Every structure is written in structure tokens, then in C-alpha cells.
Image: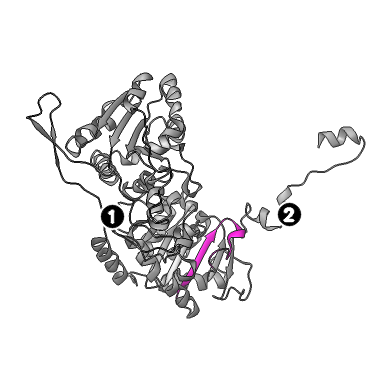
Amino acid sequence: FELQQQQFPGTDYELFPVTEYYNDGYHFDHRPTNKVYKYEVSGEEEGTVDEPLATDSPIFNEMYNVIKNAKKPVIIAGMGCNDCADELKAFAEALQIPVTSTLHALGSFDERHPLALNMFGMHGHPTPNFMVQESDLLISVGSRFDDRITGKISEFAQPAFQAGKEGRGGIIHVDLRLSERAAQVKPTFFVHSRGSTFLQAMNAAIQSDQSLGERRRTVEWLEHMKSLQQAYPIFIPKFETQKIPDAENPAITHDRTPMSAQFVVQEMDNQLLEAGKMDDAIFSTGVGIHQMVAAQLITWTKPRQMLSSGSLGTMGVALGYCIGAKLANGNKMCIAVDGDGSFNMTFTELKTVAEQKIPVKIMILDNEAQMMVEYWQRLFHNERYLAVRNEKNPQYTVLADAFGIKNIYCDAAENLPAAMHEFLFSDPEEPVLFHVRIERTPCLPLVAPGESLENMILEDTDFECDASAAPS
């Protein structure tokens, strides 16, 4: 603007906000209109598409009545719920609707709550995957329906689509970005707003609805949820105890029980919960088995508690994310849950940790492998393994010693509780590196690419996959 005035003196100029004149999809992605769009399942618009998100709008009231009367509803909490956890909880409790979360929304709905379904999708818990596929109404708030949560798109949530045709359910998609409207899944209703705006409007409608009373249609649905949770828990791989000869006296043996990533993360979760410290913890991850195991087995209680690159697949980010989290949240316990493959990418940042005395906690789950890639090569490439083993990992405790960082080592289940307690609680004002030696185990459940969401690999057995659907 100043340059224009210098080049053309005497010319009058006036500044206008760009978003005031640009009404294209890109700018609408950053400027929610707070409108409700109604669709038929075919994707054709029905009636007026620009009715406001307000209780006096006919389309809003039609949508509200669908939600109120659904018998098998599920709320999908996406990243857009991170700024409105209280509103989400109030909405779910008022209508007794179970809530499942995407990876980036973990903690937006406290997983200690009886309505919590935990994470769903490719490596999600079995119960939400089954219930999404059985539901008559999906309410997705701030999630974009990518293939990591839908599975095979042509088989996604078919009962909900049928319920939409019959006017007793359907798909409600709430998103800040107008470009996400029917981009992957064609909804019954699309709400172009922030998640907080939608939930506030819904909660206002609930509070003013005198006909609602104590009537709830989801009692049987919630009983079904409990039965699924009991029947399909996350499987924790365990191993037989070995007898290990003493280094100095071979005649003496010691018990040593190998561990899985799941076993270690579960122990960390249990200790944090028992100590009442979970609400004060922030976790970061790299990419791989450890990332998905952490997502599955940590009890997420607060928004933005999980810092992860998600489907971007950025190996090596755990330590950097953890450093940033600690600098921004000095009163929080910041824990990097990393794998050896990811940690090897950026462990030079230990120098930053040591120099700046940043009291982060770094847990390396070391199986000397890129186990997620190894499992995919087993499923999709006839066990033609390439670049999946880390045969020359450093001694991580020696590496930490070189930087003057306290370190702990554990390779047996017998020693894990004490070692984990020391790692978590003994040195709150200094960095600690915890090297945990684990066995190679896949992260299950897994919805293989090309499979429907309910068709999960639940056990580490041979599973026939479509080779042409190999993940990227």
C-alpha cells in the first residue's frame, strides 16, 4: 500500500478486508458462515441451502429432531472439538450419545467418562469401529472423514445412510471448511461453522426443549456399547518368562520376561492415573507402532494432550514437540513416547535439552525395527522385507550420559514398575531418558487399506489383504 502511494503520489486508495469481497471456497474455508446445508443421500441440495444455524430455522429444527430421536447415534469428535470440550460433554450427556475421537482430538472428551468410546479408525478401538458401522446417525464435529477413519468409503456407515433416506438419521458433518462439504462423505446435513458454534446452538436447543424431559432413546445402544467393550478390549501381547544366567555366576539364573510396546505404555498409563497426574501430562510421539499404541492405551483426559504429526508421518518429531510443549507449559509433565527408528532421526536435540536444562521425559520403545512398515510388508508384500531393521542402534543410555542426561534402562517386565516410577516421578526438575527394550509386535486392531471399518485384524495371525491397496 505504501509502495503504491510512493509510485503514484496523489492517487486516492482505500483498504478493504479481503474476505469482504472474496466469496470463493478458499476464503470460505477461513470464514464460517454458520449455515446449515441439507442434502439428500444422492448429494443433491434440497430446499434452501443458506438457512442460519439458529433455533428459529426450519432446517436447524429438522436436524435437531433427527438428533433427538436417533436410537443409535455416535458423535465423532474431530480436531474442531479441542476448543469446546465443555460444550461437547454437555451435548453428549444431555442426549446420552457415546463419543469417539480422531487422533488429533484425543482428550477433547475425557476417556474416563462412561460415554467415551476412545479412538476409532485404522488403529482404533474395536467398539467405536463396530458402533460407527452400526449407527443410525453420525454427528461428526470438526473431522474431515479421511480414509484413516472411514476405511473402505463405499462401505462406510451404510445403516446411517439408509436412516438418512428414511428421515430417521443420517450423517451430520460440522466443519469450518466449506471445501469439506461432501468432499469424502455426502452428508444429510452439512453445517459450515466452528464446532463450538454448532455445539452451543445444539445445547441451547436442548435447554429450551420442554418435550425432552428424561426421555432417552439410547439406553439399549449404551448397553450394546458396554457389551462390545467387554468382548473386544485392546489386546496386550505378553511373553513367557525366561531364565537368564547370572553374568558372574552362570549357576544362578534370573527371571526375565520380555515386554511389548503395549505392556509398557499400559504400565505408564496406570501409574499416571493412580498418582492423579494424567490431567497434568502432555505426550508427544514420533511415527510408528509406538504412536498408535500410545493413542490406543493412554487414557486421554484433556484437549491437545496428544502432540503427533498424524497421517503426515513425520518421523523424529517427538523430541522437538516435547521440548516445545515443556517450554510453553512449564507446569506440565511432558513425555515423549518414541520408537528407536523415530528417535534416531533427531536425537541430536538432546544437546538442546542438556544445554537449556529442559526437564522433559523421553521414553524410547526400542524393538530395533520399523515395525509398522515391517508388518505392512508382511501383509501386502509377501514378507519381502526392506529397510525395516535397525541393527546398529546406539546405546541410548551411553548417548544420554554423553550429554549429562539422567537415564534408566529396562528390558524385563519384572523391573518395569520400579523403573517406570523412577522415570515419571523421581526427577521432576531435570531431563530423563528411559530406554525400554521391547519385542517386535504389531499394533492391533488394524483396519487394512481397502477393508471396511468393522473388518479389523484383531489378532496377530495370517490375514489375507488386497495387495493393490498397500498403504502409502
Give the residue pinned by disc 2: 22
| Element type where label 2 sits in the image | loop
Which disc is residue 234 wearing?
1
- Is residue 174 part of the magenta span, yes or no? yes
Residue 430, can we see it? no
Tag 1 secondary structure:
loop
The residue most toward the left is 251
Neighbours of disc 2 within 10 Å: few (<14), some (14-19), many (20+): few
Residue 273 at what x, y percent from top left? 26, 42
Question: Hey, which quadrant is residue 221 in on the image?
Answer: bottom left
Verify whether residue 358 appears in magenta: no
Q: Is residue 345 visible?
A: yes
Q: Could you tell me the amino acid type at mark 1? A: Ile
> Horizontal placement of 408 versus 172: left or right?
left
Write down the quadrant of residue 40 in the picture: bottom right
Q: Which residues are magenta?
A: 169-185
Sequence-wise, which precedes: disc 2 or disc 1?
2
Q: Residues within 10 Å of mark 1 (few under 14, many from 20)?
A: some
Residue at the farthest right position: 10
Q: Amino acid at mark 2?
A: Tyr
- Pinpoint residue 235: horizontal percent, then vertical percent: 26, 54
